[in-house]
Image: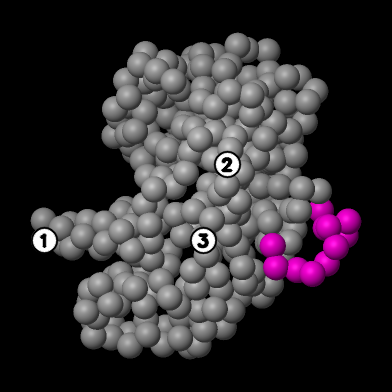
């Protein structure tokens, strides 16, 4: 797809993935309209930034009317990194916000709406021996309020496609990492400890996760916006390969020559912890042609290198 001159709206663009997506589309020549909360600064590459709370239906309608988007990437969400978030808040923001957006778009000529979900919508369904008939539709089995709200958002997106023909596609990023990620996430927290010589307390680290570099996620989102004939589909954005959390922290230690100790088992697992999550990468390749390109070790090298350079600067 030629993005030059196209009107693109990115909600929640001030977040980690949103900033990368904004820059990527700006480089491709798109007119990128972004939204964020009133106190957030627009990401580089923004054509125009609108303060927006997706809980305000009238404000969402006004934003759609002003930006007249041809493609929409909906990333605005609450509770992404907070497993203890208020369920009412995430339901209102994550599910209610999607309804406000889709309702504002359903009578407009929009080419594609890409909704950002999460791999945690699958929850225990990837590791349980329970029969599929006993699991939620599409194998979804969320274990916290954030993931449950994203399942609700997916369901509304699919309903708007079926009932109104709105060209909605949902993407589910897996364990995203890369330069600029907030410091409380696993990879930046481990890198910080490694570079400062601190000990790193962690869970036993046996959880298996599909770690995917942020620039690969962005390319996957663009593929979801470009590929023909995939309306109504849900796409996993991952590599298809799972690594244990302990293995990833070990890579960080080896790459940095860290002096601190990895204190595996110092922290307990979260209640309801999901022990295995890996993307169905082959299916996404069949549908869109996209596949992640950056392997774990290369992605960690890039992330560590950027962190070292920023400290020197």
Q: Does the magenta stretch include residue 128?
A: yes
Secondary element at image label 1: helix
Label 3 to label 1, Cα distance in Å? 34 Å
Tell me the tag on residue 284.
Answer: 2
**Eyeballing the image, is 284 above or below 100?**
below
Give the number of marks: 3
Q: Which colour scheme is used?
A: one colour
Q: Main secondary structure of the magenta part?
A: loop
Residue at (69, 41) in percent of width and height: 153
Q: How far across and how far down the image is residue 194, in percent?
A: 27, 76
Please report whichever mark, 1 or 2, sits nearer to the chain's N-terminal start. 2
Tell me the tag on residue 241.
Answer: 3
Q: Tell me the quarter of the picture where residue 94 sits.
A: top right
Residue 36 in view of the camera? no
Q: Tell me the quarter of the picture where residue 192 sits.
A: bottom left
Span highlighted in magenta in the image: 126-136
**Eyeballing the image, is 190 above or below 223?**
below
Residue at (58, 59) in percent of width and height: 278
Q: How far across and how far down the image is residue 32, in percent?
A: 39, 24
């Amino acid at each position: 797809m030629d993005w030059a001159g196209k009107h693109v709206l990115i909600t929640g663009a001030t977040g980690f993935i949103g900033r990368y997506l904004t820059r990527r589309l700006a480089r491709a020549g798109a007119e990128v309209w972004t939204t964020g909360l009133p106190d957030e600064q627009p990401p580089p590459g923004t054509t125009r930034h609108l303060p927006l709370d997706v809980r305000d239906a009238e404000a969402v309608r006004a934003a759609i009317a002003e930006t007249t988007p041809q493609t929409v990437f909906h990333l605005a969400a609450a509770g992404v990194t907070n497993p203890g978030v208020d369920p009412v808040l995430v339901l209102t923001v994550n599910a209610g916000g999607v309804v406000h957006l889709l309702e504002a778009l359903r009578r407009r000529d929009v080419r594609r709406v890409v909704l950002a979900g999460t791999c945690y919508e699958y929850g225990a369904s990837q590791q349980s021996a329970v029969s599929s008939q006993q699991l939620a539709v599409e194998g979804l089995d969320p274990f916290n309020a954030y993931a449950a709200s994203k399942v609700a958002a997916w369901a509304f997106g699919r309903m708007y496609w079926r009932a109104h023909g709105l060209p909605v596609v949902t993407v589910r990023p897996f364990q995203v990492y890369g330069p600029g990620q907030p410091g409380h996430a696993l990879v930046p927290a481990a890198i910080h400890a490694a570079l400062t010589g601190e000990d790193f307390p962690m869970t036993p680290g046996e959880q298996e996760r599909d770690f995917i570099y942020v620039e690969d996620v962005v390319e996957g989102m663009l593929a979801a916006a470009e590929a023909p004939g995939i309306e109504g589909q849900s796409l996993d954005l991952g590599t298809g390969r799972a690594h244990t959390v302990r293995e990833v922290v070990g890579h960080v230690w080896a790459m940095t020559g860290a002096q601190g100790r990895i204190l595996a088992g110092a922290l307990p697992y979260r209640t309801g912890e999901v022990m295995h999550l890996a993307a169905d990468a082959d299916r996404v390749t069949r549908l869109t042609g996209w596949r992640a390109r950056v392997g774990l070790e290369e992605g960690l090298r890039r992330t560590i290198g950027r962190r070292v350079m920023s400290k020197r600067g």
